[in-house]
Amino acid sequence: LYFTAPTFLTRLSGENATWEASEPHDEYYQWHVDRENTPHYEFSGLLYLSDYDEDFEGGLFTYDDGSVVEPRRGGPNMFAS
């Protein structure tokens, strides 16, 4: 992998079930447009490391047109920001 600035990596874990967001930005399910938050973003993407409904529940990626991506290990999800 070759990362360029800006690069954002995160790991969501179910190990801390009592965690609560301290501000709205910390909530991972808010509808947003990446380019509105960071104007120089052209594309955004996700690489799933786990399988939906096997390793975890919830976490479906839903586009604003209603189409849904079901996470599968090794599956990429790329889209215009």
Image (cartoon, grey):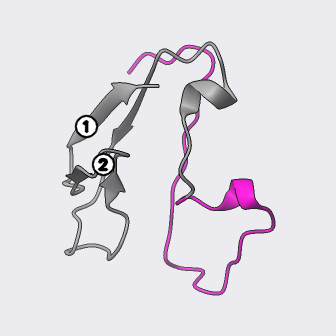
Q: Which residues are magenta?
A: 1-29
Q: Check if residue 69 falls in the magenta segment.
A: no
Residue furthest to the right in view is: 22
Q: Give percent across and percent down for residue 69.
A: 23, 51
Residue drawn at x 20%, y 43% is 75
Tell whether position 28 is magenta.
yes
Instruction: Evaluate whether residue 28 shows in this view.
Output: yes
**Residue 42 percent location from the top left of the image:** 48, 15
- The residues bearing labels 2 and 1 have C-alpha atoms spaced at a distance of 6 Å
Rate crowding at label 2 as few (under 14), some (14 to 19) or many (20 or more) other CA atoms within 10 Å. Answer: some
Of all residues shown, which one is farthest toward the front?
A: 65
Task: Kindly identify the amino acid type of the residue bearing the numbered disc 2.
Answer: Tyr
- Location of mark 2 (residue): 48
Q: Which mark is residue 76?
A: 1
The residue shown at (27%, 59%) is: 50
Residue 81 lies left or right of residue 57; in this view the side is right
Q: Are marks 2 and 1 in contact (CB under 8 Å)?
A: yes
**Most foreground residue, 42 or 20:** 42
Specify the label residue 2 is tagged with. Answer: none
Task: Say which residue appears at 47% left-offset and 25% top-offset.
Answer: 81
Give the side of residue 58 with respect to residue 35, left or right.
left
Using the rendered view, name the quadrant where residue 51 is placed: bottom left
**Front residue of this view, candidates 16 and 78:** 78
Estimate the x, y position of residue 76 in percent, counting from the top left: 25, 37
Quadrant of the image occupied by residue 33: top right
- Tell me the amino acid under the disc marked 1: Pro
Classify 24 as above or below 75: below
At x 50% / y 18%, what residue is drawn?
A: 3
On the picture, is 65 further left or further right than 31?
Answer: left
